[in-house]
Image (cartoon, rainbow, N blue to C red):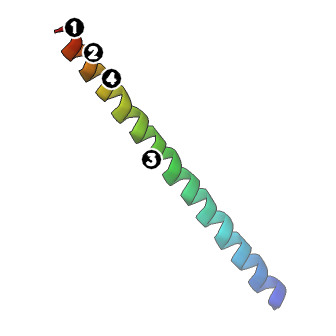
Amino acid sequence: MARNARAAARAVAIQQDAAAQTATRWMFAAAGLAAALALAGALALISG
């Protein structure tokens, strides 16, 4: 019984870790997109 509970807890932890990695990946993608847009905006202002 304890072994099953431990396995279930481990499975939940793995799922949560995967979800956290996905969220982090999306966060970095959004940050990269924002940086690219800011750079493009700055270049547009500079080039006039």
Give how far apart the Cα atoms at labels 1 and 3 are: 30 Å
Q: CA distance from mark 4 to mark 2?
A: 6 Å
Residue type marked 2: Leu
- Which of the marked residues, 4 or 1, is nearer the chain's N terminus? 4
Residue 43: image tag: 2
* Amino acid type, callout 1: Ser
Neighbor class of circle 4 (other Cα within 10 Å; few <14, some 14-19, many 20+) is few
Give whichever of 2, 33 is nearer the camera.
33
Label 3 and label 4: CA atoms lie apart by: 18 Å
* Coordinates of residue 29 in the picture (x, y in percent): 45, 39
Given contact means CB atoms under 8 Å apart, are the residues at marks 1 and 3 in contact?
no
Q: Are marks 2 and 1 in contact (CB under 8 Å)?
A: yes
Disc on res. 39:
4
The answer to whether the residues at label 4 and label 2 have Cβ atoms under 8 Å apart is: yes
Q: CA distance from mark 2 to mark 3?
A: 24 Å
* Distance between the alpha carbons at the discs numbered 2 and 1: 6 Å
Labels in figure, total: 4
Q: Between marks 4 and 1, how big is the CA–CA gap?
A: 12 Å
**Front disc: 2 or 3:** 2
Pointer 3: what residue? 27
Which quarter of the picture shows residue 36?
A: top left
The mark found on residue 47 in the picture is 1
Q: Secondary structure at mark 1?
A: helix
**Residue at point 58%, 53% (across, down):** 21
Q: Sequence-wise, which precedes: disc 1 or disc 3? A: 3
Residue 44, image x, y percentages: 22, 15
| Residue under the point 33% across and 23% down | 39
The tag earlier along the polypeptide, 3 or 4, is 3
Q: Quadrant of the C terminus?
A: top left
